[in-house]
Amino acid sequence: MATRHFLTLLDLSPEESRYLIQRAISIKNGLMTQGPTYTPFANRTLAMIFEKSSTRTRVSFETAMAQFGGHALFLSPRDTQLGRGEPIGDTARVLAEMVDIVMIRTFSHQGLEEYASASRVPVINALTDDYHPCQLLADVMTWTELRGTIRGRTAVWIGDGNNMCHSWINAARQFDFQLRVVCPEGYEPRQDILDAAGDRVTIHRNPQTAVDGADLVTTDVWASMGQEEEQTKRESDFAGFQVTESLLDRAADDVLFLHCLPAHRGEEISETLLDDPRAVVWQEAGNRLHAQKALIEFLLLGRVEA
Ligand code: CP
Ligand code: NVA
């Protein structure tokens, strides 16, 4: 059987995506009630290649493997041969001889695809310039825990048409909800990703009107990793796109606010937004652990009936 990878949300079928969310909730409940007693991956190893910084992704993957009874290995280009020019495909072949599964955070999505095509063990996208699918598993899980199915609901993305936005667009396809993307001109998501989503996703310019009646509002930093030099220009281009408590007041009464974090308080969100009860970002961050456990389990074992 061909090795399954998780490079974007579209690598799963919609049905598998829904399974994964339910399985993540079930794994979380098991952890909460019984502690880390579910250890299906004793002596198994996850290699984690990080070419960009991380707090949540590293801690959640490493903790997931520890709780599963296995081991996670942190690899950075600074102190591996990757940083000295060893070809990606060669690294993929070597690691597959030793580890069971690989997670990569890198710049180029094409580079990730190249790695995966040479890997006979599963590869997980832990963020590229184009996508951040693991975050969306945690985000949809959080919504599902708090509000039930996201199918047919309306989410609003406010800000840059970046990697997170692209994954939200793919999530709208996989989980069948409406997504309004509100961005300044020149910061739209990629047209091909947008086109593939059809009329589920619409582009807007005015955050005030776009959030009217929305069930879920989300945003992200204005300058992503690798775009640090554009910070000042982006701060001015994104003026008026800050998510505030009063903006959320225009949404549905039971609206939830999500942010993948890290957040820049005073930029894309008001200083106090994360303290608002509608913001559920700590639960969202914690769910990275449980969603990725379900993902690792699925890629290594397939479906597990609880
Ligand atoms: N949301 C997220 O991926 O956070 P880190 O960059 O800290 O991993
Ligand atoms: N868009 C952000 C997400 C960080 C988790 C970035 O790529 O830096």
Image (cartoon, helix red, strand yellow):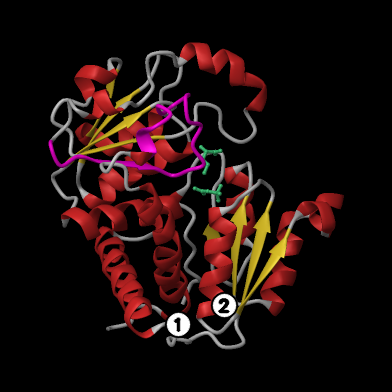
Q: Name the residue: 38% across, 39% down.
A: 274
Image x and y of residue 301, in percent: 43, 81
Image x and y of residue 288, in percent: 44, 59
Asked whether mark 1 lies closer than 8 Å to ligand 1, one says no
Q: In which quarter of the image is the C terminus?
A: bottom left
Asked whether mark 2 lies closer than 8 Å to ligand 1, one says no
Q: On screen, 266 above or below 125?
A: above
Q: What element carries label 2?
A: helix
Instruction: Identify the disc placed on residue 263.
Output: none
Q: Is mark 1 on a helix, strand or loop?
A: loop
Looking at this view, is 278 or 261 the one in front?
A: 278
Local crowd size for mark 2, using a 10 Å CA cut-off: few (<14), some (14–19), many (≥20): some
Q: Main secondary structure of the magenta part?
A: loop
Name which residue type carries label 2. Ala
**Circle 1/circle 2 CB separation < 8 Å:** yes
Which residues make up the magenta segment?
Answer: 253-274
Residue 123 visible from this viewpoint: no
Residue 263 visible from this viewpoint: yes
Identify the image quadrant of residue 258: top left
Name which residue type carries label 1. Pro
Looking at this view, is 58 or 92 the one in front?
A: 58
How far apart are the alpha carbons under marks 1 and 2?
9 Å
Q: Name the residue: 17% across, 30% down.
A: 251
Q: Name the residue: 21% across, 36% down.
A: 200
Q: Mark 2 points at which residue?
A: 66
Instruction: Identify the disc placed on residue 36.
Output: 1
Horizontal arrangement in the rendering, residue 133 relative to residue 16 (left or right) = right
Image x and y of residue 285, in percent: 43, 54
